[in-house]
Amino acid sequence: MSKPANAAEIERIAVLGSTGSVGTSTLDVLRMHPQKYCVEVLTSNTRIDVLREQIGEFKPRFAVVSDPESASILAQEFAQDSSVTILSGARALEEVVALPQVDTVMAAIVGAAGLASALCAVEHGKKVLIANKEPLVMTGRLFMQTAERTGAIILPIDSEHNAVFQCLPADQSMRDVSRVHLTASGGPFRGKSWNTLKDVTPEQACAHPNWTMGRKISVDSATMMNKGLELIEASALFDLPARQLDVLIHPQSIIHSLVEYIDGSFLAQLGAPDMRIPIAHALAWPDRVASGADTLNLAEIARLDFTAPDLDNIPCLALALSAAEQGGAVPIVLNAANEVAVEAFLQKQIGFTQIPQIIEDTIDTFLAANSASAPENLAGVLNIDNDARLRAAARLSSRP
């Protein structure tokens, strides 16, 4: 990968999902370096209270609100302000990332909702900081092949993938890599038996011991589906078969991933559990800028622990690893069913331990009626995603 041609100029950023945890962390980093970056686009789904403040501070040219009703409210408020244009709807997200004045896109919209805009940014050859797992989980090689064709630069923001990226050679070659180890904190229920978690509440599931994240991602961390999705993403991002990837439980969340080389060497990236570190790395790559994160005190930390995950006791991770091995359409179905199940749990429609049951049943019914082959284009991906969501919803409505 080469440095963007306009690297000496101010880099113009579109922050998709600017009111979420990754989005606000991105703005924290950008705030520190006004001489290097300016915000061209901010987007949110419905949180116009936060978006309003961000517009006032960062003065973007465009703001997009996915929800039409929320967009209408914000547009009325800024009707007399000619410096910002308020847009609405999913199509507007694609339009703003394609703007010629946008150099870099932070893709931080959670879930499948972020797929089309992220892929559009890649289609237009942008520098894409990929923070949402779903584009690579759902499209796999299609996403990376598009980047190769258009010259888009893909830089991972997930702390684990960013750590792998930092531990690879300068040319990002995988030829001497024998294995990649993704670390996981284990979430709030690390070490507990799955059959004791039946009465877990959404509030308990969202109380992560190390990271501050959105509710959906927090639940994924509690079930460890998050780590399974990350493994699927890493397979596509680094062009590695699933058999060369594994997961290690590392409760301190200090080592974010390890790359094992054929000569027996291990390279690891360490840092405080603060998303501003990978964000700053990707924004400035191949240079470095201050992130605002605390510096590690290794003497104070004193020890770093690792254990292998007990897959018999972590059913969501087991389902994701199986989907990674099967490939094709299965990761798309897994992701869709998980989104439906997690939302149902957050709405208190199902119990915590029912999440993997919904996912497994959805995968089984899909495979019984459809081919597991990978789709050839985005339309095929979205068709499978929609089919899986309908199956998961039907499973919810028929649950005992």
Image (spheres, rainbow, N blue to C red):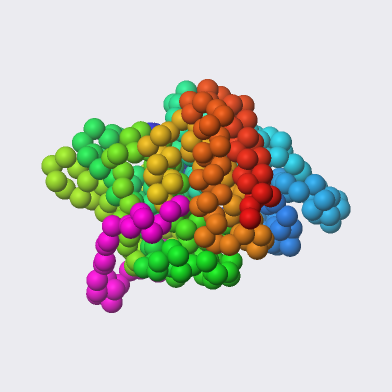
Q: Which residues are magenta?
A: 289-316
Question: Relative to 188, does residue 139 appear above or below in the rendering?
Answer: above
Q: Residue at x 62, y 30 (%)?
A: 383
- Above or below, 184 relative to 136: below
Q: Image quarter for residue 184? A: bottom left
Q: Is residue 229 left or right of residue 400?
A: left
- In reply to whether residue 340 is colored magenta, the answer given is no
The residue at the point 23 percent across, 39 percent down is 177
Q: Whole-percent x and y of residue 295?
A: 35, 68
> Is residue 122 found left or right of 262 in the rendered image?
right
Q: Residue at the location (39% across, 62% down)?
A: 186
Q: Nearer the viewer, residue 176 or 57?
A: 176
The foreground one among 230 and 127 is 230
Outermost residue to the front: 400
Residue 209 in percent (x, y) is at 44, 70
Residue 53 image offset from top left, x and y in percent? 70, 62
Q: Main secondary structure of the magenta part?
A: loop
Q: Could you tell me which quadrant the N terminus lies in?
A: top left
Work out whether residue 238 can be spotted: no
Q: Is residue 311 visible?
A: yes
Residue in view at x 13 percent, y 42 percent: 263
On screen, residue 227 versus residue 35, left or right, reads: left
Picture quadrant where residue 50 is located: bottom right
Relative side of 342 to 279, left or right: right
